[in-house]
Image: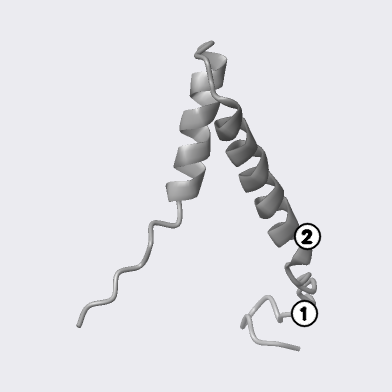
């Protein structure tokens, strides 16, 4: 049994395609605009809910041996 991972960039590519269509002046149905807005909103909400990674603490190293002091 093989497991396939979904393409992590598929959503970004889809949004970029829709963006290019808008910039090209194509007529976009309101449903597609709603889809674009919903995708952007979902991405921003997920980013806001992501845990904040703590900053790494610098480690002082001996310049001669590159070992911690």
Q: Taking 38 as reference, is 23 above or below it?
A: above
Secondary-structure class at tag 1: loop
Secondary-structure class at tag 2: helix
Q: Which residue is mark 2?
A: 48
Q: Please identify the residue farthest to the left as the structure is shown.
A: 1
User: Which residue is rendered at x = 45% and y = 57% of the image?
Assistant: 8
Q: Is label 2 or label 1 in front?
A: 2
Q: Quadrant of the C terminus?
A: bottom right
Mark 2–mark 1 distance (CA, rounded to whole Å)? 33 Å
N-term mark: 2 or 1: 2
**Image coordinates for residue 10, horizontal then vertical, percent:** 43, 48
Q: Taking 37 as reference, is 18 above or below it?
A: above
Local crowd size for mark 1, using a 10 Å CA cut-off: few (<14), some (14–19), many (≥20): few
User: Which residue is rendered at x = 45% and y = 40% of the image?
Assistant: 13
Whether residue 60 sits left or right of residue 37 in the image: it is: right
**Image coordinates for residue 58, horizontal then vertical, percent:** 78, 75
User: Which residue is rendered at x = 71% and y = 48% of the image?
Assistant: 41
User: Which residue is rendered at x = 77% and y = 79% of the image?
Assistant: 60
Based on the displayed image, in which of its 4 quarters is residue 5 positioned? bottom left
**Image coordinates for residue 21, horizontal then vertical, percent:** 49, 21
**Image coordinates for residue 34, horizontal then vertical, percent:** 64, 37
Local crowd size for mark 2, using a 10 Å CA cut-off: few (<14), some (14–19), many (≥20): few
Q: Which residue is mark 1?
A: 60
């Amino acid at each position: 049994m093989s497991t396939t991972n979904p393409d992590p960039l598929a959503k970004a590519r889809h949004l970029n395609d829709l963006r290019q269509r808008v910039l090209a002046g194509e007529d976009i149905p309101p449903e597609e605009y709603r889809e674009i807005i919903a995708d952007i909103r979902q991405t921003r909400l997920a980013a806001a809910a992501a845990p904040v990674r703590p900053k790494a603490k610098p480690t002082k190293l001996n310049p001669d041996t590159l070992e911690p002091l």
